[in-house]
Amino acid sequence: MSIKKTIEDVKEFGGFPDENLLTLFSKVSDLVDKTLIEETILMKEPKEIRETVVNRIRYARKELFIITPSDTITDSVKVFPFKEMAGRGVRIRICMPISRETVGIAKELTKFCQLRHIDTSSMRLSIVDNIWLGIGIGARDISRGFLVSSNRDLVGYVKLLMERIWKGGMETHLRIDQLEE
């Protein structure tokens, strides 16, 4: 269980008996958050992949950047609380192919996410808070593997590539207008 979650739970059940204890928990939490262990692993077990990705994305604090094939966005909308995340101040950007089949989801996402159309994507990329990277190999079949990394150099490099894709993407309202003509 994370220290942040522990703090939230204790506050919910009546608070800390001593304000100094809250301060100590907060400082430890900040220290843990700043002391990242850099690692890169390839996961193959679908259950482990799902749990890892869902937990990392759900608990984003500042920013979530995703590039995804359109056939996985429906699942993502069901699993990830994008609206709640945006309400907590998380900046969410998603690049995805927007087609006639996904235009409804795209319209819904634009209420709380920045969205761009890209023609195609054969893999899933996600960066959480500029410190965690997930790369899904293959569009829907995650059994081919999922690379996760907190290696700052790798995260930074992939983020640069994702920024280029974002800049080259079409603004959502333009793509929706195209599809609705």
Image: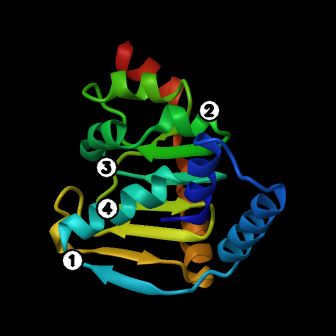
Which quadrant would residue 88 be assigned to in this image?
A: top right
Quadrant (top left, top right, bottom left, bottom right) of the C terminus? top left
Q: Earlier in the sequence, mark 3 or mark 2?
A: 3
What's the residue at 66%, 52% (across, down)?
62
- The answer to whether any part of residue 123 appears in the image is no
Q: Amino acid at mark 1?
A: Lys
Count neighbours of disc 3 (C-alpha within 10 A) and say few if under 14, some if 14 to 19, many if 20 or more.
many
Nearer mark to the viewer, of 3 and 1 = 1
Q: Earlier in the sequence, mark 4 or mark 1?
A: 1
Tag of residue 87: 2
Q: Which residue is mark 4?
A: 51
Nearer mark to the viewer, of 3 and 2 = 2
Residue 84 drawn at (x, y percent): 53, 34
Nearer mark to the viewer, of 2 and 1 = 2
The reply to whether the C-beta atoms of the residues labelled 2 and 1 are less than 8 Å apart is no
Residue 107 drawn at (x, y percent): 44, 22
Q: CA distance from mark 4 to mark 3?
A: 20 Å
Q: Which residue is mark 3?
A: 69
Q: Secondary structure at mark 2?
A: helix
